[in-house]
Image (cartoon, rainbow, N blue to C red):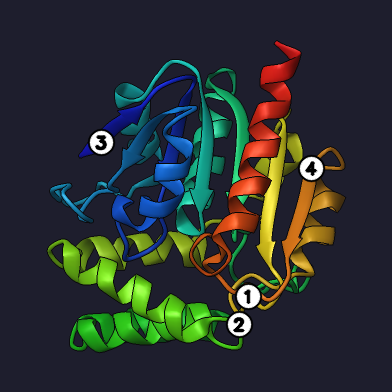
C-alpha cells in the first residue's frame, strides 16, 4: 500500500473515497501540511498502490493500515475513506485522537430504520456495470457526486483530472470496495466510539443527505456536525475555504488544550 508522507507537526491520516486516490486531497493537503505531518494513503488498487485479491476484506485492510500508520494520529476520511476510518477506529480506538468524517455515513444504503442514505439499487447498478463499462461507470459516479450542488461543473472537472493523473483503479479493487459501501453498516460502531468526532456534510450531497447529521447525533450525541451550504459530495473541492476551516478548528481545539 502506497502512503505518501509530507508536512510537519502532529500526525494526520487522510483516506480518499471510492475510485479516487490520495492526489484528490492536493489543495487541502497543501493547506494542512504546514501544521500536520500528513499520511496520504492510496487504498489498495488505487493510485500508486498495487492490488492483491482480498485486500478490501475490511478486517485485513484495517490490520494492514494499522501496520503502516502511526501509533496515534488524527484521522480524516472522505466517503468510503470515512467508512474505513470508522472501522479502523473500532479496531484501534486508542490510536485515533480525533476523527473527521467528510461526506460520510456509517451506512450508505437505505434501511427501514435508516432513511438518510441512498437506495441500494443505485450502488448495485454501479457494481453491475463495472465489469464491462468501467470508464463510463466512473464518469457517472463523478457526475452523481456533484449533481445539484454549487460549482458542480468545476467539481466534476477537478475529480476527472485526478482520475487521469494516476493509472485507472484496478477493476477488482473497485468492485470489492464498492461492496463495502453496499454492505457495511457501522452505526453501532459510531454509537460506541469515544474519541471526538466531527461530521462535515454538504448541503446538496446526493449520496449522503444532510438529514444524516441529526441521525448520526442520535447515535452519538457528542458528535459535532457542520453543514457546508451549497456543497455536494466533495466539499473540499467545491468549497475549499469552508472545508479547511472546519477541519482546522476541530483539530486545533485539542492542540490548545494539550
Seen in the image, is 217 located left or right of residue 192? right
Tell me the quarter of the image containing the C terminus. Answer: top right
Q: Which mark is residue 205?
A: 1
The structure residue drawn at horizontal position 41% and vertical position 87%, both measured from the top left corner, is 125
Residue 243 in picture, x, y percent from top left: 61, 54
Q: In the rendered image, which residue does mark 2 sit on?
A: 149
Q: What residue is pinned by disc 3?
A: 4
At label 4, counting other C-alpha atoms closer than 10 Å, the crowd grade (few under 14, some 14-19, many 20 or more) is many
Residue extending furthest top? 258
Q: Residues within 10 Å of mark 2 (few under 14, many from 20)?
A: many
* Closest to the observer, 111 or 103: 103
Q: CA distance from mark 2 to mark 4?
A: 25 Å
Quick check: 16 left or right of 194?
Answer: left
Q: Is label 1 in a helix, a strand or a loop? A: loop
Question: To which residue does mark 4 refer?
Answer: 223
Measuring from the top left, give residue 92's x and y in whole percent: 52, 24
How packed is label 1: few (under 14 Cα within 10 Å), some, or many (20 or more)?
A: many
Report the Cα–Cα distance between label 1 and label 2. Answer: 7 Å
Q: Earlier in the sequence, mark 3 or mark 4?
A: 3
Would you call the spot at circle 3 few (<14 residues within 10 Å), some (14-19), or many (20 or more)?
A: few
Amino acid at each position: 500500500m502506497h502512503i505518501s508522507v509530507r508536512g510537519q507537526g502532529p500526525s494526520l491520516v487522510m483516506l480518499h473515497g471510492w475510485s479516487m486516490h490520495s492526489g484528490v486531497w492536493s489543495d487541502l493537503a497543501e493547506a494542512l501540511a504546514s501544521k500536520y505531518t500528513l499520511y496520504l494513503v492510496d487504498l489498495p488498487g488505487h493510485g500508486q498502490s498495487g492490488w492483491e485479491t482480498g485486500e478490501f476484506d475490511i478486517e485485513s485492510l484495517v490490520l494492514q493500515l494499522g501496520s503502516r500508520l502511526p501509533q496515534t494520529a488524527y484521522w480524516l476520511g472522505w466517503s468510503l475513506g470515512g467508512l474505513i476510518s470508522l472501522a479502523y477506529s473500532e479496531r484501534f480506538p486508542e490510536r485515533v485522537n480525533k476523527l473527521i468524517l467528510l461526506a460520510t455515513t456509517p451506512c450508505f444504503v437505505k434501511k427501514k430504520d435508516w432513511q438518510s442514505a441512498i437506495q441500494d439499487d443505485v450502488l448495485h447498478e454501479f457494481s453491475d456495470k463495472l465489469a464491462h463499462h468501467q470508464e463510463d461507470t466512473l464518469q457517472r459516479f463523478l457526475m452523481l457526486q456533484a449533481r445539484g450542488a454549487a460549482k458542480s461543473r468545476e467539481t466534476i472537472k477537478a475529480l476527472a483530472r485526478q482520475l487521469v493523473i494516476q493509472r485507472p483503479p484496478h477493476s477488482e479493487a473497485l468492485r470489492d470496495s464498492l461492496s463495502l459501501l453496499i454492505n457495511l453498516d457501522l452505526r453501532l460502531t459510531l454509537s460506541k466510539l469515544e474519541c471526538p468526532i466531527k461530521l462535515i456534510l454538504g448541503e446538496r450531497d446526493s449520496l449522503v443527505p444532510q438529514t444524516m447529521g441529526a441521525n448520526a447525533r442520535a447515535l452519538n450525541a457528542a458528535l459535532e456536525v457542520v453543514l457546508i451550504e451549497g456543497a455536494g459530495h466533495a466539499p473540499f473541492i467545491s468549497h475549499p475555504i469552508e472545508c479547511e476551516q472546519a477541519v482546522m478548528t476541530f483539530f486545533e481545539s485539542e492542540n490548545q488544550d494539550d
